[in-house]
Image (tube, rainbow, N blue to C red):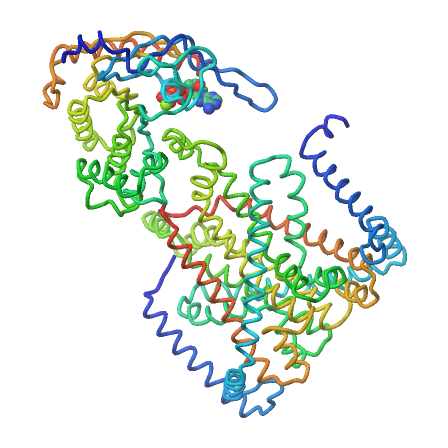
């Protein structure tokens, strides 16, 4: 099956229609509304890898939480496989920036958690969890507690937990943001491998331009202020991209500097506003 | 923190105890006023007598029953009110002032009122223990639940946990566990005091009653012999809870 | 001041007080006004106790033992704590005894205090002083031993001498612990003074409670309890504030 036929026969994995979301910030007496998402229309195809970048506070996390149905939009619809959703479901799984592991649970219990919530038999849940932990090389640490693991290992647990749910869509909020640079590259490769093997759909927020371009089929750039989609850029680079020299290809550097120029303007404006 | 190696500390403490007991024994013998300072040997003899007569075991049993009952009731009340106070501002402002006042009022000052209102039976004695122990439990529940683990709540919700009750039991209480145990440890210390107060003031019973009745007839050796197990009981309970607490420290 | 009264932190406690007192008044009157002393009866008793000056005199007696005992506890407790902190071996040897004494309920030690000190002022003073002093000294010792190795290292790298080390690292590091000890010591002192007045010499506020108990006058007991609660709240709140002030100094080394 080629990408084209999938697109024709399947509805988008996730589709957003006219999403608006604002928050009320109360600072003492005077309340202020912050527009976090201001009319987002977006379709993410099956098996696509989309990265999202944008200046801090532009609404990336809010967008992801809306996609996960962790918060409901003020207006607009979220569709998963063409059907509207309003609460977290089993087709989507989150991976969190600060890993989101329960410190009082062992590694294996963290991974079985979503399965236990779904009332799977304990033995079955354990079996599934083990399988995923083995794949990321954590079989020796199943009975450890999260604080005994390094950041990279903790996030592998977080990733295993999301994969063990069997969800088709991974929603990842700066998943490698808190991981050291070398481990991070390794994890990127691992994620790409899993994504390719298992044909997942991945939506991946990052602050790192290299990472955004390196991983993505498409990069979604959000603009500051009222959260809008500024531009969506197709990344035309061959896969697999596990090879380091993808970074020195012309397409890579051009896409990267294009994104940087757009992003840079926003940052300069933000600076100016803050200093006045 | 300057920590000396454990085995050195233990060696010094053992030597310390040996010296302390010897000095006590010798000076008490020389001083020869058993009413004021009974020698260690006399205290041990008294302890032995209390043990074989079964009086000590019986008294300890009574005391532990009272302690456990009081702590259980205090935990229940502390849990319910603490949850209310943490989750509702209204409950906080309506209830918190009373508990704060109760916390700084010596339990002993309340005991005569308990006597008048509830009598000196088991109910009255349990109430005294509850009055002593409830506030630390309540405060720990309230503060443990107030620092909401928002990130973990979000994780649980994203994987399908629904409803406040589920979140309370699966995430909030678990995350608050270290604080809750610290509260329970404080409460247990205070409960032992409450127990002793109840047993000496309301009706002579348990280990507190034993001590008071020997005190009344100035049998100082027996007073010492009965205080010792009471102190050990208090230390044992607190140590037990701290052990458990240490196992909870994940961070 | 309508704006003040609309704050929930003001009107909710007032509402709750009105509800509690109202409910108590109704229930107390309908069951047994003598035994369940409704708020009106307590207020009347409180007024008459204040009018005759009985309560003021009692409070004075209580405060005298409390403050003298507490002051002595500070004077003895801090230097002793510093000594135990500076000589870790001494501290380690004494630790178990102090801990055992500290965890022994004082009501059961009363018989011993009677044979040692009698039932007079000295006996009451001892009840206040001794347990309070233990709390202060144990915490002080912990503070002195707590000196953060990383800060000691920093000071040493800047070639600080002993006095500078004490002034900039050791004392500031120990103060939060000392203050915590002072608060725990004060709580102990308050309990101690009341125990002394109820079990040793029937005087002061504890004595008023005890007399009220014998005369079966709950209103009288409640009046004294209220005064004790207010006194305790004031003292503990003040020390709490001081403790918070120094809290930030208690940075942990990682
Ligand atoms: N729960 C909330 N309550 C109030 N305001 C919020 C909330 N969540 C987000 N906001 C506001 O909405 C805006 C977008 O926030 P969001 O977290 O989505 O940004 P972000 O792009 O993820 O930023 P970052 O790159 O720093 O993670 C910000 O101004 C933020 O302050
Ligand atoms: Mg974010």
Tell whether B148 sits left or right of C220.
left
Q: Quadrant of residue A113?
A: top left
Look at the image and tell me in which quarter the C terminus of chain B lies: top left
The image position of residue C133, as x and y in percent, is: 57, 65
Camera-side residue of B167 and C212: B167
Q: Residue at x 60, y 51 (%)?
A: B135
Camera-side residue of C200 and B246: B246
Q: Residue at x 28, y 11 (%)?
A: A11
The image position of residue C40, as x and y in percent, is: 85, 48
Q: Residue at x 66, y 81 (%)?
A: C115
Q: Quadrant of residue C228?
A: bottom right
Quarter of the render that holds ligand 1: top left
The image position of residue C55, as x and y in percent, is: 82, 58
- Count of numbered marks: 0
Camera-side residue of B211 and A231: B211
Look at the image and tell me in which quarter the N terminus of chain B lies: bottom left
């Amino acid at each position: 099956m080629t990408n084209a036929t999938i697109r024709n026969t399947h509805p988008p994995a996730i589709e957003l229609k006219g999403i608006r979301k604002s928050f009320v910030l109360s600072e003492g007496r005077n309340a202020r509304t912050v527009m976090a998402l201001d009319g987002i229309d977006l379709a993410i195809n099956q098996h696509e890898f989309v990265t999202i970048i944008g200046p801090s506070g532009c609404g990336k996390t809010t967008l992801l939480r809306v996609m996960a149905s962790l918060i409901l939009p003020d207006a607009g619809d979220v569709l998963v496989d063409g059907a509207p959703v309003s609460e977290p479901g089993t087709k989507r799984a989150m991976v969190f920036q600060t890993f989101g592991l329960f410190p009082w649970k062992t590694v294996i219990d963290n991974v079985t958690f979503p399965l236990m919530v779904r009332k799977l038999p304990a033995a079955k849940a354990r079996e599934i969890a083990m399988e995923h932990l083995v794949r990321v090389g954590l079989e020796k640490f199943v009975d450890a507690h999260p604080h005994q693991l390094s950041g990279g290992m903790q996030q592998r647990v977080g990733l295993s937990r999301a994969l063990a749910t069997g969800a088709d869509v991974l929603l990842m909020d700066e998943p490698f943001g808190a991981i050291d640079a070398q481990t991070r590259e390794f994890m990127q490769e691992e994620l790409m491998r899993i994504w390719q093997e298992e044909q997942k759909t991945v939506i991946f927020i990052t602050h790192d331009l290299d990472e955004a371009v390196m991983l993505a089929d498409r990069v979604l750039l959000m603009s500051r202020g009222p959260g809008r989609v500024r531009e969506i850029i197709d990344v035309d680079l061959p896969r697999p991209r596990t090879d380091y020299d993808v970074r020195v290809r012309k397409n890579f550097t051009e896409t990267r500097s294009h994104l940087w120029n757009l992003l840079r303007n926003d940052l300069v404006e933000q600076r100016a506003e803050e200093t006045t | 923190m300057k920590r000396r190696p454990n085995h050195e500390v233990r060696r010094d403490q053992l030597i310390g105890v040996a010296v302390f007991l010897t000095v006590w024994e010798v000076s008490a013998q020389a001083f020869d006023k058993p009413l004021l300072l009974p020698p260690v040997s006399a205290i041990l003899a008294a302890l032995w007598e209390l043990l074989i007569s079964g009086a000590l075991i019986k008294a300890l049993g009574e005391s532990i029953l009272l302690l456990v009952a009081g702590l259980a009731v205090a935990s229940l009340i502390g849990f319910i009110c603490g949850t209310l106070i943490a989750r509702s501002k209204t409950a906080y402002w309506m209830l918190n002032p009373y508990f704060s006042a109760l916390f700084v009022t010596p339990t002993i000052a309340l005991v005569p009122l308990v006597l008048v209102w509830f009598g000196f039976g088991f109910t009255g004695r349990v109430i005294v223990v509850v009055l002593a122990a409830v506030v630390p439990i309540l405060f720990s529940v309230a503060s443990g639940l107030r620092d909401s683990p928002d990130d973990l709540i979000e994780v649980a919700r994203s994987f399908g946990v629904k409803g406040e009750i589920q979140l309370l039991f699966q995430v909030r209480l678990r995350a608050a566990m270290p604080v809750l145990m610290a509260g329970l440890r404080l409460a247990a210390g205070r409960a032992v005091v409450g127990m002793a107060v109840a047993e000496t003031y309301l009706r002579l019973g348990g280990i507190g009653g034993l001590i008071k009745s020997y005190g009344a007839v100035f049998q100082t050796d027996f007073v010492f012999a009965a205080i010792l197990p009471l102190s050990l009981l208090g230390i044992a309970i607190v140590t037990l809870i701290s052990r458990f607490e240490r196992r909870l420290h994940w961070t | 001041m309508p704006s003040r009264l609309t704050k929930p932190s003001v009107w909710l406690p007032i509402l709750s007080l009105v509800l509690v007192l109202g409910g108590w008044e109704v229930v107390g009157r309908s069951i047994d006004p003598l035994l369940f002393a409704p708020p009106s009866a307590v207020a009347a008793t409180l007024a008459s106790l204040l009018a005759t000056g009985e309560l003021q005199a009692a409070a004075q007696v209580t405060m005298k033992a409390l403050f003298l005992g507490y002051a002595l506890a500070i004077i003895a407790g801090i230097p002793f704590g510093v000594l135990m902190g500076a000589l870790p071996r001494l501290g380690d040897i004494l630790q178990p005894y102090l801990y055992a004494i500290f965890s022994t309920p004082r009501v059961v030690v009363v018989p011993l205090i009677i044979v040692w000190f009698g039932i007079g002022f000295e006996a009451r003073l001892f009840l206040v002083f001794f347990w309070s002093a233990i709390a202060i000294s144990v915490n002080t010792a912990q503070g002195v031993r707590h000196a953060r190795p990383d800060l000691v290292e920093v000071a040493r790298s800047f070639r600080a001498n002993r006095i500078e080390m004490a002034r900039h690292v050791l004392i500031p590091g120990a103060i939060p612990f000392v203050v915590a000890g002072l608060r725990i010591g004060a709580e102990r002192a308050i309990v101690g003074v009341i125990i002394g007045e109820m079990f040793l010499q029937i005087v002061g506020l504890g004595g008023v409670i005890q007399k009220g108990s014998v005369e079966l006058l709950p209103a009288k007991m409640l009046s004294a309890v209220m005064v004790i609660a207010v006194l305790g709240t004031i003292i503990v709140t003040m020390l709490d504030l001081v403790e918070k002030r120094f809290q930030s100094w208690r940075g942990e080394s990682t």
